[in-house]
Amino acid sequence: MDDRVRTDALYEQAALDVVQNFLSNQQVFIGPDPEIMESHALAPRSAREDQLLQQTWDRSRAGLLRDRLVSNCNETWEMMSQIASSPGAKWGDSITGVWTTSGDLAMVSTGGVLGFASITHYALRHIMKYWKDDPSIGIRAGDAFMHNDARWGSIHPADFATFMPVFHQGDLVCWVGCSEHLGENGAIEPGGLTAMAESVYGEGLRISPMKVAEGGVLKRDMVTFFQNMVRDRALMYEDMKARMAVCKMLIQRVEDAIGDVGVDEFVAMLRMGLEDVESEVKRRITALPDGIARAVAFGDSTLREKAYIKANVELRKEGARLIVNMRGSSPEFANRTINSVLGSTKAGMGTLLCGFFWPDLPRNQAVLAPVEFEWDACSSIASSFETPNTISMLTLFPAFTAMQVALAKLTHCAPGPQTTTIAPWYNMINTYVYGGINQRGQLVGSISANVNGMPGGARCNQDGEHSLSALFSVMGDLPEVEVMEEEVPYISLIAKKMLQDNQGFGKYRGGSGYYWCISPKDSPAWGFAAVANGSSFPTVGGLFGGYGCGVYPIAKIRGVDIFDRIDHDPRAFSTYDFGKLMNEQPIPGATYETQTMGMPFELAQRGEMYLMSQGAGGGYGDVLERDPLSVAKDAREGLISLDVARTVYKVVLDAHSFALDEVATAEARTAECQQRLSRGKPYAEFVAGWTTPGPTNLPAPYFGCWDKPDEIWVGTEEIPSPAEALQPVVMEDPRVRQVKDLQARIASLEQRLSVQGVQP
């Protein structure tokens, strides 16, 4: 080749490079990468990891390093709970962790939100793929990146995460980070959880992974931008600083570990720990019996109208494969905030494995990595980019429950040692979202951490725990009443009292849920909202014959200032029983109301009372097999009534002493067994009389499959739609519908007046 030809070739290549570089920099929008967002597997080994793992390492040292780093994560998690301002983080709804260079979560705090162990890698992989080599961004020591958008790897927009890189001699060796439930994010309703948004553009601040600090210092222009988008500006700044402080402490701990073991061993041990856990999970999956287990769960509203929203789960075990098939679940809702992105739904399975089935395993991303998933695109548990997901828990948590039941069925018959089988944990966020001006004149908004008091399901050998912890944060805590009242302007007139008969009955009963009553005080403007399902259809069932939980309303006592009455008569509020307050209505002149747990934000007046109850964990086994003495004990402690003891458990107790009448109990149970036999039918006969070809004559629209997962029923449509071509469901605005109804009534009245010769 002569010099001229060579020069022409070089020129052409240079021109091509210029054009290619130009085109690559003209991408209009660098959104979530499907290749990243659909993969929960471990990233391939880096060249450095692969080279290091060719060597022989002492695996016992990997365990020692893991314990050391987990201890560091626990230290910083506790630190976060002490310095954070958000109620969620104060009571444990956060995590701290260490990620590999590629973004795989290798170590995480023992306490906190386990779901983050399966979801935080998405944002880091985006940063590594798109921002690492971008000259306008880059990754350097002292940088910090932040995000809160579920579409890039979060549960919902109320959760905020901060990550910082760790360098050693100029090389990136790992990441550290902190995720928390911050709350207020500037949505159209205060508190960070809005049901009123009609699109993603009403859900408030949505931060894609972006750099917010350089040289270890927050960029005040970015801080000001975020503060300008939310109501609680102090909270935004304080917790940005808190997460940064936690990350800096973790960087120091990681640097100490590298100084002790060497950087090569540190990098090798992070990767080895992940691969060892992945191998162990594969071994445990292989040990499970082959088969299929199915389960369903339902939400009962979109928070703005009644609806049956199905989470459909089929769990298949085939050799070394465990497949979670979620096809047949409800389609997504274009203008309701209850959709869950796929990564969030997968995180539910990760939480189940880490917290309920294999709690002895290290809690990292590798626990979920071998599990496979199948889903319908544009479904409510795998929603698309333009659908809102602020309250994703309303589809995510029923899916969690269905997965929990299916997995319990599959693992219960496994040979050899196994984790204790447990009925479904309560799964709804029964608590108040609040917002307004606090007693110090500050505009605030968040969620009460009473949500962390979810009751536990019954186990195969003992009763469930009362209001123990949230299913997503098995070591979270409940707020102290005095601490809450110092921070927000409402008083707990009743705090954490057990609600009678609020349990899942069974051979072993589920844990009971508590109730509480709060009332605003010392605020010129204060209000509440609620964002839970389960007021008309139970969200949690039992297991192997056990009963599920009940249904729960919000109760209000309005039109009264209870504090003013107490000032004049200390006995004005002397009834501390939920049922008596609402049924006997002891406060003269007050208005007593109940409504569903989907309550849009409303302003409350001083001294008005809002009551709510936690649900109940599912029961396990046949109620007729429950030890009568255990029934008597529950009755003596006020957990159940004599009516429930007699009608549900068929246990006869003395009305005053609660003494057990063994003879009468035996007779009652024998009679009930005979009644069951008389009601029994052959299976084929039962199915013929029970099943229908579709969801007909239901009191609310139905969304999801009926008997065929590839056919999806959409609301009131008379025929199902194909699952492979789902379209987002658009619901009518209830306020518009109400106006139309009122206009129709006015027109009807005018017509009647016209017939009577009266001019409207």
Image: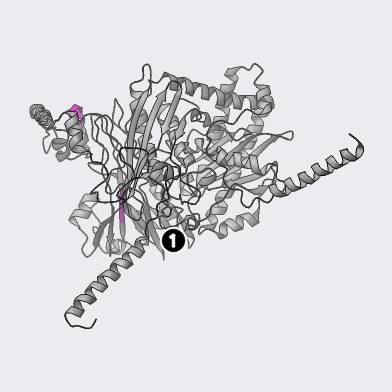
Q: Inspect the magenta stretch and tell me whether residue 613 lies in it.
A: yes
Q: Which residue is drawn at 59% across and 46% down?
A: 209
Q: Residue 77: in sight, yes or no?
A: yes
Image x and y of residue 539, in percent = 31, 42
* Residue 456 visible in this rendered orientation of the protein: no
Q: Quadrant of the C terminus?
A: bottom left
Residue type marked 1? Gly
The crowding category of the residue bearing disc 1, from other C-alpha atoms within 10 Å (few below 14, some 14 to 19, many at least 20), is many
- Where disc 1 sits, the SS reads strand
Question: Observer-nearest residue: 576 or 2?
Answer: 2
* Left or right: 297 in relation to 505: right
- Note whether 277 is above or below 551 in the view shown: above
> Relative to 750, is 483 on the left or the right?
right
Identify the residue at the far right of this view: 3
Vertical side of 512 occupied by 752: above or below: below
Q: Mark 1 points at which residue?
A: 436
* Left or right of residue 422, residue 758 in this image: left
Q: Is residue 218 covered in magenta?
A: no
- Please state, as top left, top right, bottom left or bottom right, where the N terminus lies in the image: top right
Q: In which quarter of the image is residue 657?
A: top left
Q: Where is residue 753 in the image (x, y as percent from the top left)?
A: 20, 78
Q: Give the range drawn in magenta.
A: 610-629
Q: Position of residue 750 (x, y in %)?
A: 23, 76
Q: In this view, does 730 lie to the left or right of 625?
A: right
Q: Residue 445 in the image: x percent, y percent? A: 46, 56
